[in-house]
Amino acid sequence: MTEPALSPIQAPGGNAAVPAASPAAQALLPVSADGVELVARFFRALGDPARLRLLEFLLPAEHTVSECVRHIGLSQGRVSAHLACLADCGYVQARRAGRFAYYTVADPRVADLVMLARSLAADNAAALADCVRIAPAPAAERAART
């Protein structure tokens, strides 16, 4: 009998804990410290709930800053700053038409990433809720105090 393509990592006691990354996935992992920092920076851009909400809002269609402000409920300045961050990191792009800027998701893979993240978060909701090593978002922290 042949070995499975994904060999499990052994937990203490010899039990299989987590499947090892496939050769294809291992090829995608950064080798250098600079590569790891770049990937971490990529995910930090998604670490703000407002930016995630903006990305999800922009997935199906392009929207103006004013539409984003109405949808997300933050000030125009904060929404513009979040959109600028997302644009600087390559998640969204702007199209100018007169005095309006229309924002849209720059790469269709962003939708896949957001949906995968939602699925993984749902599957791990209890663990994420109990996690004490990652601080809650500032807005959630304020709401918890009031």
Image (cartoon, grey):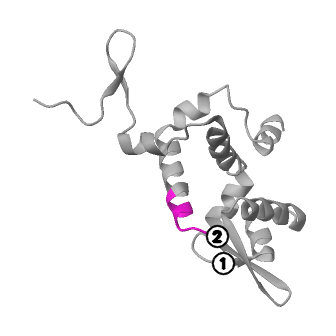
Residue 10 higher or lower than 69, as above or below: above
Frontmost residue, 2 versus 111: 2
Frontmost residue, 43 versus 122: 43
Q: Residue 50: x, y in percent?
A: 74, 55
Mark 1 secondary-structure assignment: loop
Q: Residue 23: x, y in percent?
A: 36, 40
Q: Residue 14: x, y in percent?
A: 32, 12
> Pointer 2: residues within 10 angstroms few (<14), some, or many (20+)?
many
Most distant residue in the left direction: 1
Q: Classify the position of the C terminus by image quarter.
A: top right
Badges 1 and 2: C-beta atoms under 8 Å apart?
Answer: yes
Amino acid carrying label 1: it is Glu
* Residue at figure coordinates x 52%, y 63% from the top left: 109
Return the residue at label 2. Answer: 58
Frontmost residue, 63 versus 103: 103
Amino acid carrying label 2: it is Leu
Residue 7 lies in the magenta-colored region = no
